[in-house]
Amino acid sequence: MASQETAVTRRMQSVKHIILVLAGKGGVGKSSVSTQLALNLYVSSPTAKVGILDVDLTGPSIPRMFGVDDKGVHQSTAGWVPVYADGSTARMACMSVGFLLKNKGDSVVWRGPKKNGMIRQFLSDVRWGELDYLVIDTPPGTSDEHLSLMEHLAGVHARLSAVIVTTPQAVALMDAMKCLSFTRAVNLPVLGLIENMSGYVCPCCGEVNNVFSTGGGAEMALKEELRFLGSLPVDTELVSVLDGGQAVEGSDGGFGLLERYKLTPSAKLFATIVSGVLGSLE
């Protein structure tokens, strides 16, 4: 075990910041927030190198959201080569169990030890290279995957932090509190809280309807002395972009997903959120 832990620590030494995206319950849009966080960190600097690791092993969605679910990882002498969503620029590295499945519709039915081994491989055997940010999309709740991450990343704990995602409903906020309790139990710094699905913006008139109420995230952040990073309404344009499931080249042959994302209302809102994330990191 010691040699395996050393392998993880050695691989992660080239990663400046590791950000876990947490959510207490499913269905709050955690993976879409992880995707947007990675995209916004990517554009935060012309040279920023970003990785996104999908450890939602039984429900991997990152490959489809990045439009690369038809790709596969390759083995090299230095380890697994991740899938680069931005093509030849190679500044957006993606890794997910979804790339390893023979059939995309296959279920992943694994017990804890196998999940633990897979996460260890993702951290130690993927050729991440030099990264400014590694965003880790975790499954909902606090379970085997989260404990495995904290165990394997103990050697680089100073580089770890988390973002918590919730929706405004009372049930979601209760589960978000459990995530917060977990971070405090394992001494994981929280960069802030994001309230997702905070209202619905009508694509015709622009009127905002609070389908799930609003403001609960801000109240929780204030009460728990967390940074409130911002609210994101339901955005039908974002859903269309991230649910495409097919890579599209940009106008100059570049990162097509990023070009389409920049045109969504969510992109403008998330720019403020990522400024808060970077501020917390500093």
Image (cartoon, rainbow, N blue to C red):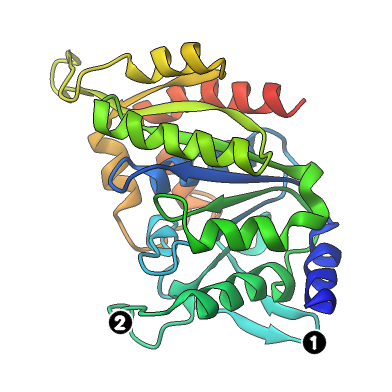
Q: Residue at x 53, y 24 (%)?
A: 273
Residue at 49%, 74% (x, y): give it.
Answer: 112
Which residue does the numbered mark 2 point to in the structure image? Answer: 106
Q: Position of residue 217 (x, y in %)?
A: 38, 20
Q: Which amino acid does label 2 sit on?
A: Asp
Q: What element carries label 1?
A: loop
Residue 214, given in percent of the width and then of the height, sits at 27, 16
Q: Which of the marked residues, 2 or 1, is nearer the chain's N terminus?
A: 1
Tag shown at residue 161: none
Q: What percent of the width, then of the height, locates residue 247?
A: 42, 62
- Residue at 57% x, 79% y is 73
Q: Residue at x 14, y 15 (%)?
A: 205
Could you say which quadrant of the image residue 121 lies in? bottom right
Which quadrant: the N terminus? bottom right
Q: In this view, does 261 lie to the left or right of 239?
A: right
Q: In which quarter of the image is the C terminus?
A: top right
For label 2, the crowd category at 10 Å Cα-Cα, with few meaning under 14, some 14 to 19 and many 20 or more, is few
Between 259 and 84, the residue placed more toward the observer is 84
Front position in the image: 57 or 255: 57
Compared to residue 8, the image places residue 219 above or below, namely: above
As rendered, which of 141 and 261 lies closer to the eye?
Answer: 141
On screen, residue 257 above or below 101? above
Q: What residue type is labelled 1?
A: Thr
Q: Identify the disc placed on residue 77.
A: 1
Q: Does 224 appear above or below 52?
A: above
